[in-house]
Amino acid sequence: MKKVIALVVLVIAFSATTVAQDKMMSKDLKTVSLEQTPGEFTQKSVTLSEGTYVFEISNRQAGTDVGFVLVPQGKDASKPENHIQAAYVTQVVKEGEIQTSNQVTLEKGTYTYFCPLNKTPQYTLTVE
């Protein structure tokens, strides 16, 4: 009986810790909103501080579905294994819609972002 009670207390303590961590993560989570039009992002560069982000991508009559790719600068952006896959939008963004990525933790450095579907240029995202 004591083992069962100890196990229940342990599970409750673990659950409380997980909930507290989730609330802290949500509080520190930031959103980066980017907008695509035909052949380009309207934001030509982005500067952020280190942290955890969700990318929110809007399709403003781009003429095609849009997506989002983020790559550490210096890596070959044409190779998917170099992409920060958590930054991909969770669904292709149709005209007039907005979609988001998963959470991405960014450290200091320079990154490149672009849309492979809307064939945008590659832009710079700097984390200071």
Image (cartoon, rainbow, N blue to C red):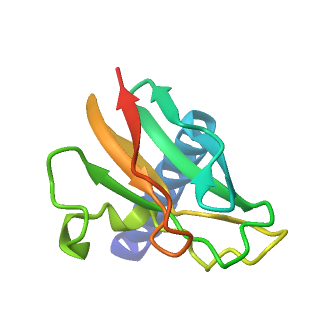
Of residues 39 and 107, the one nearer the viewer is: 39
Left or right of 3? Residue 115 is right
Residue 6 at least partly seen: no
In this view, the residue in front, 5 or 20, is 20
**Residue appearing at x 57%, y 52% in the figure:** 55
- What residue is at 68 percent from the left and 78 percent from the top? 64
User: Residue 29: x, y in percent?
Assistant: 57, 40
Quadrant housing residue 95? bottom right
Please state the horizontal and vertical placement of residue 56, each as a whole percent of the image: 65, 54
Does residue 88 appear anywhere in the picture? Answer: yes
Name above or below for residue 97 compared with residue 71.
below
Residue at 66% x, 43% y is 42
Q: Determine the residue located farthest toward the top in the rendered image.
A: 128
Position of residue 125 measured from the top left corner of the image (x, y, whole percent): 41, 36
Name the quadrant of the C terminus.
Answer: top left
Q: Is residue 97 left or right of residue 76?
A: right
Q: For this view, does 123 lie left or right of residue 80?
A: right
When the figure is inspected, residue 77 is found, relative to residue 65, above or below; the finding is: above
The reply, left or right, for residue 75 in relation to residue 103 is left
Where residue 66 appears, as percent x and y from the top left, is: 61, 72
- At a point 49% along the width and 67% down the height, the residue shown is 119
Check the image and report above or below for 23 versus 114: above
Q: How many marks?
A: 0
Whether residue 46 is situated above or below residue 96 in the rendered picture: above
Image quarter where the N terminus lies is bottom left
Residue 91 falls in image quadrant: bottom right
